[in-house]
Image (spheres, rainbow, N blue to C red):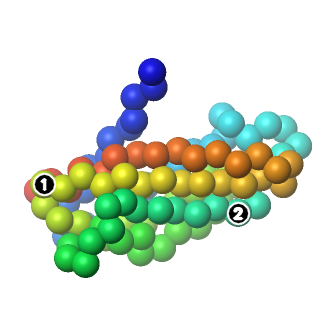
């Protein structure tokens, strides 16, 4: 059973995190679209995807906010030109740093 990687951030920080797909995308294929989902979604102190970008086989996600001592799941779903679709999920733990 695979373990889910955990990231941490301070609730006041605005930081970038990388979903690296280079070990998954085969030669001759490329990522053509992606989606980043955050759960749970709440009205108060929501972890926010402030901005994101596709750079070759990596999705870079800039995150802001988040409620102290909360955990969020961040899922990156990609689709390739060859029709492959896959998800990777990370846990974001909000802590004082």
Could you say where residue 12 lies in the image, as x and y percent from the top left?
19, 70
Give the camera-side residue of 54 and 49.
49
Q: Hey, which residue is sitting farthest bottom in the picture?
A: 43
Label 1, label 2: how far apart the Cα atoms are:
32 Å
Could you say where residue 28 lies in the image, as x and y percent from the top left?
88, 43
| Contact check, label 1 and label 2, Cβ < 8 Å | no
Residue at 66% of width from left, 40% of height from top? 22
Task: Give the answer, above or below, for where 78 lies relative to 42.
Answer: above
User: Of the numbered discs in the image, which one, if any, rests on residue 46?
Assistant: none
Image quadrant holding the C terminus, namely: bottom left
Residue at 24% of width from left, 52% of height from top? 71
Q: Is label 2 in a helix, a strand or a loop? A: strand
Q: Residues within 10 Å of mark 1 (few under 14, many from 20)?
A: few
Residue at 36% of width from left, 60% of height from top? 39
Say left or right for 72 vs 60: left
The reply to whether residue 76 is visible in this rendering is yes
Q: Where is mark 1, residue-wise?
A: 69
Q: Where is mark 2, residue-wise?
A: 33
Give the camera-side residue of 16 and 84.
84
Q: How many marks?
A: 2
Quarter residue 50 falls in = bottom left
Image quadrant holding the N terminus, namely: top left
Task: Give the answer, above or below, for where 22 lies relative to 10.
Answer: above
Q: Hey, which residue is sitting farthest top in the picture?
A: 1
Could you say where residue 77 lies in the image, as x and y percent from the top left?
59, 54
Q: Is label 1 in a helix, a strand or a loop? A: loop
Could you say where residue 15 lies in the image, as x and y percent from the top left?
35, 63
């Amino acid at each position: 059973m695979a373990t889910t990687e955990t990231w941490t951030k301070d609730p006041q920080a605005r930081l970038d995190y990388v979903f690296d797909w280079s070990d998954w995308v085969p030669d001759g294929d490329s990522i053509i679209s992606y989606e980043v989902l955050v759960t749970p979604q709440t009205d108060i102190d929501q972890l926010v995807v402030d901005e994101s970008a596709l750079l070759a086989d990596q999705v870079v996600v800039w995150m802001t906010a988040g409620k102290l001592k909360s955990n969020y799941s961040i899922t990156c779903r990609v689709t390739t030109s060859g029709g492959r679709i896959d998800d990777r999920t990370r846990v974001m733990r909000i802590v004082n740093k």
